[in-house]
Image (tube, rainbow, N blue to C red):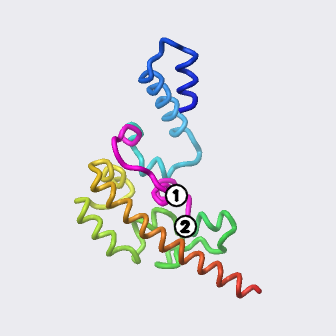
Amino acid sequence: MAMEREEMHADRGASRRDCRERTMVRWKKRIETAETGSWTRIVIPDLNAWCYRRYGLVDFHLTQMLSGHGCFGEYLQKRKRRDDPGCVDCGAASDDANNVFFRCDRWSRKRRSLEGVIGREFDPKTVVGAMLTGSKDWDAVQSFVNIMQQKREDEERDRQRAEAARQN
């Protein structure tokens, strides 16, 4: 967006809309060719719909779900905060955003409840589409994500404290 403002000042004849469209084209190209961010490309397949929505604030936990960066075994292992990348709840070999939000048995009851609210299956390819159908669905998904991640973060902190105490 800073480049957008810079472009508007440099080209006095350019409209805000034109600058935004050029920014979106550059951003899409960058996202499509990036070596990282594959998870985000799965959950946000339509960048325009995502960027031009009229509601829904993205908070800390929702960012974790959308980026795959956060309190997930795989992510924590890469940052040397955990030895094992597996899920402590279901035993899956890889604890990542896909496992936590869409697969792990621990959260299946909450997932089914969420599906009742949003009226569709909750999976990586439909999550953002569901959120974009209305603020009620956005709020339901955000609440689901916040509850899960807060619980997982609390438990991870407890695990790390217990590990530190064992080492002392």
User: For the residue carrying disc 2, how many other residues have a C-alpha within 10 Å: few (<14), some (14-19), or many (20+)?
Assistant: many
Residue at the outermost right position: 168
Q: Is residue 146 left or right of residue 73?
A: left
Return the x and y of residue 75 as percentages of the image width and height.
60, 63
In the drawing, what numbered circle is on residue 68? 1
Return the x and y of residue 99 as percentages of the image width and height.
46, 67
Q: Which residue is drawn at 56% across and 62% down?
A: 70
Q: How far apart are marks 2 and 1 (CA)?
A: 8 Å
19 lies above or below 167: above
Q: Which residue is drawn at 48% across and 60% down?
A: 61
Q: Residue at x 54, y 26 (%)?
A: 5
Q: In which quarter of the image is the C terminus?
A: bottom right
What is the count of numbered marks? 2
Residue placed under numbered mark 2 in the picture:
72
**Amino acid under label 1?**
Gly
Examine the structure image and report whether residue 75 is included in the region drawn in magenta: no
Residue range corresponding to the magenta coloring = 49-71
Q: Is residue 75 left or right of residue 98?
A: right
Secondary structure under the numbered disc 2 in the rendered image: loop
User: For the residue carrying disc 1, how many other residues have a C-alpha within 10 Å: few (<14), some (14-19), or many (20+)?
Assistant: some
In the drawing, what numbered circle is on residue 51? none
67 lies above or below 48: below
Contact (CB < 8 A) between labels 2 and 1? yes
**Amino acid under label 2?**
Phe
Quarter of image, res 77 = bottom right
Q: Which residue is drawn at 54% across and 48% down?
A: 37
Return the x and y of residue 25 as percentages of the image width and height.
47, 29
Near-viewer residue (115 or 52): 52
Residue at the outermost top position: 13
Examine the structure image and report whether residue 63 is included in the region drawn in magenta: yes
Secondary structure under the numbered disc 1 in the rendered image: loop
Return the x and y of residue 87 as percentages of the image width and height.
52, 74
